[in-house]
Amino acid sequence: MRTTFAASSAGAAMSGGDAGEADGIGLFLDVDGTLLDLAERPDEVVVPASLIADIAAAEARAGGALALVSGRAIAELDRLFAPLRLKAAGVHGAELRLDPDDETLTSANVEPLPHALWAELNVLLRDFPGTFVENKRYSYAVHYRQSPGAGDALRRRLADLLETLPYPGITMLDAHCAFEVKTRLFDKGRAVAAFLAYEPFRRRTPIFIGDDHTDEAGFAAVAANGGRGYSVGSRRPGAVGAFASPAAVRAWLAAYADGAASA
Ligand SMILES: O=P(O)(O)OC[C@H]1O[C@H](O[C@H]2O[C@H](CO)[C@@H](O)[C@H](O)[C@H]2O)[C@H](O)[C@@H](O)[C@@H]1O
């Protein structure tokens, strides 16, 4: 069963508590292109066994204040990072799991996208061999990694489609060789804000690490709450620094988990 989550009212209902344990940071980690190297297809990513152990140890060092903030669905994150079941935001914040013992919640007012739009996208993609669309209920990700030259034409066709179809409020975001078709009702920034209203994130200094345009809302949210965003590869708008690669993020996480690095 899914429940609707309203960040503001639930946050106000939280009791107080000292969040000053550990070293005072709250870690928000993007997945693809940040913790994991990018792969040709979404189901081809490799999760190093050492990463699972390092995330668990980093979560312990952060006093539990660690969450995945991903474009993937939470069920998919659980499969990738098994046996861990982490605090997580999925599908760019449409799904929230503030406590690993809880079920997955959907953000307030967020509904699955219309099936008719899914059908329209599949028809459109017949003109773009090598592309495909991934159905995440609250977002349809149109992938063109295997047809990289198609990006510009595909962007124009998708924009035209969204303009002409009767689905108000649906937009698309540029991602890595993909366009995320979603409503404007949720994003990674709002997901981070929801976590920050809860223990153990309250009063922590939030750190967000992400790699693409969809992560920029996360960088803005941590900056607005006294924290810092770091991108991966190039330095993206809103980030105060950048890791060279996902391998560099994993190395930092391992060092942080060991107590050999801080944030
Ligand atoms: O927010 P993230 O955790 O970074 O997830 C973003 C998207 O990741 C996946 O797509 C991306 O990674 C694939 C595997 O490396 C790659 O083939 C694809 O080109 C990338 O766009 C995932 O499929 C999406 O649903 C996520 O939104």
Image (spheres, rainbow, N blue to C red):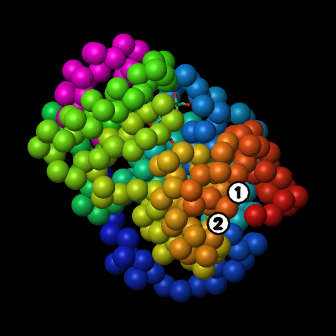
Instruction: Identify the secondary structure beneath mark 2.
Output: strand
Q: Is residue 234 visible?
A: yes
| Residue count near mark 2 (Cα–Cα under 10 Å), binned few <14, some 14–19, many ≥20 | many
Looking at the image, residue 56 lies above or below residue 115 = below
Instruction: Identify the secondary structure beneath mark 1.
Output: strand
Q: Residue furthest bottom?
A: 16
Looking at the image, residue 99 lies above or below residue 69 = below
Residue 228, numbered circle: 2
Residue 241, numbered circle: 1
Looking at the image, residue 71 lies above or below residue 200 = above
Seen at 20% across and 27% down, the residue is 119
Coordinates of residue 242 in the picture (x, y in percent): 70, 51
Lateral position of residue 76 relative to residue 253, left or right? left
- Is label 2 in contact with label 1 (beta carbons under 8 Å)? yes
- Which one is in front, 229 or 65? 229
- Tell me the quarter of the picture where residue 174 sits: top left
Decide which of tag 2 and tag 1 comes sooner along the chain: 2
The verdict on residue 213 being magenta is: no
Q: Amino acid at mark 2?
A: Arg
Bounds of the magenta segment: 117-137
Seen at 75% across and 51% down, the residue is 253
| Residue count near mark 1 (Cα–Cα under 10 Å), binned few <14, some 14–19, many ≥20 | some
Question: Alpha carbon of mark 2 to alpha carbon of mark 1: how far?
Answer: 9 Å
